Amino acid sequence: MFYYDPTYILILPAFLFAMWAQARVQKAFNSYSRVRAKSGITGAEVARDILARSGLSHVQVERIPGMLQDHYDPRVKILRLSPQVYASDSLAALGVAAHETGHAIQHDENYVPLAIRSSLVPVASFGSRLAFPLFLIGLIFSEVGLSWLMTVGIWLFIAAVAFSVITLPVEYDASRRALALLTQGGYITQDELPHTKEVLSAAGMTYLAATAVALTQLLRLLILRGSRRD
């Protein structure tokens, strides 16, 4: 939002937290992407094997370009892994691959938070694009009767915040499943577990930071609307 006011100080700690979390996940992934798993199995092989053991052989595993663009697409039931994960036998790769496989298992089990998040995708995407422009228009032209646009913008942004909040249990549950699947399946040893957990914990912190940024942004919008009404 191209508008400056003193309330920006509210979101500064959250932004710093987000920057730290992103740096931490990059450091953890880079560090453990150089540590090969004793099993010698690649991320793609781990994903396919776990899916087969879970009765999900119909879920495809594809390689996609881009750094850490790994994700599971529930619409087409495809698990997409980046080159750094797909063909690597590092602890970082196995952790990420198992995490994304956890999302496929969540989808198959109709995991409620995942279903809620999926239903919020359209409105959250729409809201994140239009919330700030509408709010800014309402803020600038509030004196000519357009202040109601601030309220519309806030409600649209609330949808984006809700998406961010519901993402937390989805991601943390996927990481919990990943660690259990990796150890129970013999893909990593007990000695390798703490290192893999460090990668997934760092990734989880980025989602927590994103939620913190979203919540402080929402607080800022509410304060601005309140002050303009006064």
Image: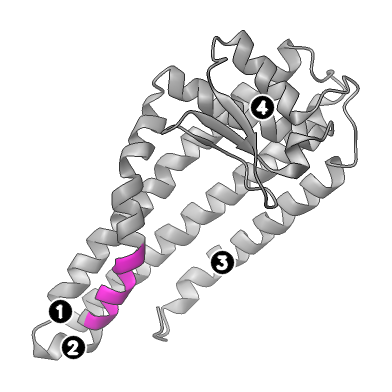
Proximity of marks 1 and 3: CB atoms separated by less than 8 Å = no
Does residue 230 appear in this view?
no
Q: Earlier in the sequence, mark 2 or mark 4?
A: 4
Instruction: Tell me which secondary structure the magenta stretch mostly adopts.
Output: helix
Label 1 neighbour load within 10 Å: few <14, some 14-19, many 20+: many
Q: Amino acid at mark 2?
A: Phe
Residue 131 screen position, x and y as percent: 30, 67
Q: Earlier in the sequence, mark 1 or mark 4?
A: 4
Residue 35 screen position, x and y as percent: 90, 36
Q: Could you tell whether 215 is left or right of 181 in the image?
A: left
Q: Amino acid at mark 1?
A: Ser
Proximity of marks 2 and 1: CB atoms separated by less than 8 Å = yes
Secondary structure, mark 4, is helix
**Picture quadrant where residue 37 is located:** top right
Q: Earlier in the sequence, mark 2 or mark 1?
A: 2
Q: Which residues are magenta?
A: 129-137
Q: Earlier in the sequence, mark 3 or mark 2?
A: 3
Label 3 belongs to which residue? 15
**The N terminus: image quadrant:** bottom left
User: Residue at coordinates 36% horizontally, 61% vertically from top-left?
Assistant: 128
Q: Tell whether position 132 is magenta.
A: yes
Label 1 belongs to which residue? 147
Q: CA distance from mark 1 to mark 4?
A: 48 Å
Secondary structure, mark 1, is loop
Q: Tell whether position 83 is magenta.
A: no
Q: Which circle, 3 or 2, is nearer the viewer?
A: 2
Label 2 belongs to which residue? 141
Q: Earlier in the sequence, mark 4 or mark 3?
A: 3
Residue 104 screen position, x and y as percent: 52, 25
Label 3 neighbour load within 10 Å: few <14, some 14-19, many 20+: some
Label 4 belongs to which residue? 98
